[in-house]
Structures are given as C-alpha cells and as structure tokens.
Image (cartoon, rainbow, N blue to C red):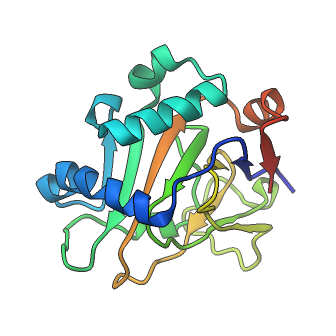
Amino acid sequence: MYNNAALLTTINLDSIDILEKEWEPQRLKFIDRYGIHFLRVMFEDLTPYFQNFFLRVADELRLDTSQINRYEGFNIWYNDPKVRSTSNIKYTSRIHIDTERNVAISIPIYALSPVVFYDNDKINDTNYKKLVVKKPNQVITYSFKHPTLLNTKNFHQVFNFDENLQRAVLQLNCMEIFDSLVRRNSDKVIVL
C-alpha cells in the first residue's frame, strides 16, 4: 500500500461555525460570479482569512511561501443545490491521477464524500480512465480538525456526491512529492 494521506496535526482548523462564516465572503467573491463548481484561483483571489490560514500551513510545512502564488495555486470545489451550473462535476468520480499537482492540502468547509485510493501497480495506465476497480486499498475522509494532505499522484477517485448537499473544500496545490513532504515534516504530520 502506498502513502495516500496525512494530517497536519500542528494546525487546528477553526470550528465549523467559523469556517462556514468565513466561507461566505469567499463564496460570494467567486462562486456567485462564475457560477461553477470548480475554480482554480491564485493567492490574491482568496479572502484575508484563507490567505492567512494557507500561509500558516505553508510556513508550518516549510514550503517556500514566496512562491505560493506563482507555481502552486489553489482549487475550490463547491456545490450548492440552489445554484446549478453547466460544468461537469462528475469527472472526479473516474479513477485518475492529478497532473497539475503532487499534493492537495485540503480544508473542508461542508460535508464531503471520501477520497478512494487504489494501488498504482494494479491499474494499467493506458486504460485507467475506463477501468472500474472493485476494491480500493484505502478510503480517506477529510478531517474537520486538521488540514488533510492528499497524495494526488496515486490513483484515486471521489465518488459522486449527493448533489442535493452543500459542500465546499479549499485546496492548496503543492508540487513537492508527497513522501518527501511527509518525511521532512515527520514531527508534524500523521500518515493515515
């Protein structure tokens, strides 16, 4: 089994009430304007609350914060059943490997479906987009206590959510290899 996820235990997430309150201006800033379920943004697009939070995370993990805007970027995944979009939100339900990042450092705002990981050596990468694997090697649920680090270079999928549920997650994209990041920060993270 590969290392798929870890928790940054030296940083605690604020309570759900605070995260939801701070999410509202972020939602208004982006989602209502673009009306989409997925948005890639840069550091300056985040509200001050989330800028400060991700700077703390980057500092704690000893990432080069001067480069955070230039090469890493942020993903926002969001669904509100009252706001529909023409974007395809089902593509993450395919088994895939992310091409634009090695690690997703995630903070959930609302309930999310788990991320399911598979053994890389059991998937033929020439046809993995069509492959249905019956048995995952690990199922990860986002932590609402600590930032969750996901190894996006291992095969994974997010099963379709209940589209009637509100959900949101913000992710800092990190280019460092997952195992290297965890090894460098072994005193601060717990591998799941």
Asked if 150 appears above or below 95 in the picture, the reply is: above
- Image quarter where the N terminus lies is bottom right
What's the residue at 47%, 17% (across, down)? 67
Compare residues 178 and 20 and report the one nearer the observer: 20
What's the residue at 66%, 56% (across, down)? 155
Whether residue 84 is visible to the viewer of this picture, yes or no, is yes
The number of numbered discs placed on residues in the rendered structure image is 0
What's the residue at 80%, 67% (across, down)? 137
Furthest toward the top, the residue is 66
Residue 26, image x, y percentages: 27, 50
Residue 43, image x, y percentages: 35, 31
Q: Is residue 16 left or right of residue 164?
A: right
Residue 72, image x, y percentages: 46, 29
Q: Is residue 43 left or right of residue 93?
A: left
Compare residues 129 and 48 and report the one nearer the observer: 48
What's the residue at 65%, 45% (across, down)? 153
- Image quarter where the C terminus lies is bottom right
Asked if 17 appears above or below 57 in the picture, the reply is: below
Q: Is residue 164 left or right of residue 119?
A: left
Q: Quadrant of residue 34?
A: bottom left
Whether residue 151 is visible to the viewer of this picture, yes or no, is no
